[in-house]
Image (spheres, coloured by chain):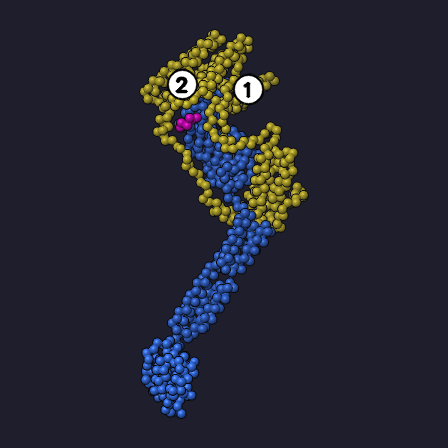
Chain colours: A blue, B yellow
Amino acid sequence: MRKILLFVGLLTLFLLPAMAVSAQNEVTPLSLDLTVYSDGNVKIVYYVESDPTKVRADVDLFGSVYSTVVVRDEEGNPLASTQRPSGITVDSLGATELTVTYYTASLTTKEGLLWILNVTTPVSSTITLPVGAAIFDLSHVPVDLGTVGGLQYVKMPAGDLSIYYIVGLPNVQQEAQTAIQDAKTYIEDKEATGIVLEGARDQLEAAQSLYQQQIYVDAKEAAVDAKQLAISTVSAADSASTKISLAADAVQRAQSEGRTSGLSEAEAELQSARQLYQVGSYPEAEMTAIGAAQLATAAKAPDNIMLYVGVVILVAAAAGGYVYLKRVRPSLGQTTPQAPAAPFTPVEVDFAMIFEKHEDLRLEDKEVLRYLAENNGEAFASEIRDRFDLPRSTAWRLIRRLIREDIVEETKIGNQSLIRVMKKYHKA
Amino acid sequence: MKTRVLVFTLLMMLLLAPLTHLVYAEETGGEGTEGTVEGTGEETGEDTGSGNIDPLILEQIKQDTEARYQELYNLIFGQSSPPEDEGTEGEGTEGEEDPELAGYDGPEIPEGTDPALRNQFMHAWMAMQQAQSMEGESPQAAAQQYLRAMKQLRNAWRKYQKDNPEVVEELLEETEGGEETSEEGDEVPTEEEITEIQQELINRFQERFQEQLTNMFSNYNEVQGDLSPGDAVKAQNALYHAEQKLLRIQERIRAGEYDEALDELDETTEGLDEEFEELEDPASAQMFRTMNQYEARIAKMVEKMERKATRGEDTSEDEDLVNQFRGNVNSAKNEHKENKGKGDGQGSDNGNGKPEDKGKPDKPDKDKGNK
């Protein structure tokens, strides 16, 4: 027993000073900040107090593999350091405070989407988690936690700590809500332009119903489908609208080119396409519009035989007119039509009676009456104008005056006015 | 029996010895350092002693737990067909009826759900309910309950991702390309920069060390009469050896042998400490170590003040600090003298080789990494 006592005593004597010496180069932890990135790397900023009487300081680091180790003193001077098994030895050269910054990937592990950060700290530490991280478990009740700059942080007490978190855990309720709102906005916008989105709206209602039932995953899918359906319907509507426009152009072109044969069918098809578009049957409207365009393109001018028939009718009508005029005026064929004469009976106008009854007749009136008397008591208005070189309006007023005085009468023959002296002024 | 007790005591000393530096660390933390750590927010600390927790923290934990429950519930049960029993083992909760869940009145878990998953959700819900009921009386216990709920949810997620690898695969694809590690903004000094600054720092250190030794000689002269003859010689020798070594170091620096100078500076400072340790009277040893510490700090502060004065900056605060350090050196000497007078021989050794907390200058106001 005494041998054991002696051995232990000697061991104590040897080891205690050694431990005391090794402790002398230790530093005092002040604070520890860990910033975790989404790839599992951790940036560590470790603040420690060091002994100003010492030239070197041993700093234990966290993790097993370190990279980009930078040590600075309290004035920001970069200090040289060398690695040792559990950390680094810094040439502190009397620094009172050291800031050690480095990266390590050895503090995190991953199971599927679940990340785990494990670290043993000598001082309370602040852990900043990656963007979109959701904490799933903590080894201790934290000293503090919250969000800064969109990043969640946890301040944990000193000791062994574990933080479980997931980056990008979907919030399906929010996603469903967003998808529904997105689809709704799109559908309403397009409906405002007159596009019928009945199918998409039905699908949207289904999504809303699923959301109400808290079946968020399906609700989101239904909302996405609703928008997709709306997009494809809008695309079909646009396509149908384009085809209807093309068909309308084809019909108009056929009309302007006189290709009227078969055009009525094209117009009917075009009308049908427009009706289908109005009720939201866009694929059918498109097909019908394509048919209308084809019919309009195929429309032809009327056949030549019809043209000949038309010409014959016109010739016959002209001949009839000629015969008629020939019967009314023997002088037909002259450039100016002559007053009809047949059956020819010489007429002698009784000027004395006219001048007696109408003393206030103007000279030009009397001249015209003499002209009529020379022409067997009658003449076309155009002949009178030509004879006296009168403007059309002046001749018209003159003739109106004589008609009003009841001296002459007017008879329409075709497009001509035949002016004739009233029979009461004919000599017997 | 006595022998056994002695062996046990020695073994305990061996076992506890490594912890001495932790004690040292706790007691000296933060003294005299300058604040460089930026605060990031209001400190909302936990009073672990009384078992209380800041209500804001509890609220945050509660919100996080409830959010996780809802997110996971929606993800797993937000489909027309719930996840069926895939035959995988649940963690801690198997398919059989759990008597603890008899009073469950939470959200409906769809029929046909894997029993393990069902139990985990139900346990999580009940833990949340219990936590809620504890919030008023025992916030700390409530927080623990919320964490218990989170643990259930974590296990539920593990099971879900194990049973639905395709969903996890899909989500992994979606989350790819997140915020990768970026070392932008980190100023990484080059080897040349470090070497250049190291040489400057070696120069500054040896100058300070020389000043420190001069002051220590002066201190020695003042306390010499209070030391035992043996300790007086040992202390003088310690300072003398250090001074001699420093002269050689200065020669090396002049010769541009900085690496060697650095090693010898390290040996010299360590040697000085060790020689102080060897004084017969622990109180005297402690006094010298304390004075040495403060003299090092004084030399550093004086150097800093000189630089600030060159830049035309105010040094009044630094001067106050130096005066406080000097006061502490005098206190150490006086305390030693008084104890000697009383003849207790124990001095003011606080057993950690560092200056006492008593009479320490106030720490500069700083926020050490709070968020």
Q: Quadrant of residue A388?
A: bottom left
Q: Is residue B135 left or right of residue A379?
A: right
Q: Is residue B58 above or below residue B230?
A: below
Q: Is residue A295 above or below residue B14?
A: below
> x, y percentage for residue A60?
47, 28
Q: Is residue B56 magenta?
A: no
Which residue is located at x 47 percent, y 26 percent? B35
Looking at the rendering, the stretch of residues picked out in magenta corresponds to A73-78
Query: Which circle's residue, 2 or 1, is located before the other in the chain?
Result: 1
Which disc is residue A365 wearing?
none
Which disc is residue B10 wearing?
1
The kind of residue tagged 1 is Leu
Regarding residue A86, the answer to whether it shows in the image is: no
Query: Quadrant of the image for the N terminus of chain A?
Result: top right
> x, y percentage for residue B250?
35, 18
Which residue is located at x 57 percent, y 42 percent? B67
Q: Mark 2 points at which residue?
A: B208
Q: In which quarter of the image is residue A246?
A: bottom left
Q: In this view, does A349 lie to the left or right of A226?
A: left
Decide which of B347, A303 is in the foreground and name it: A303
Magenta: main secondary structure equals: loop
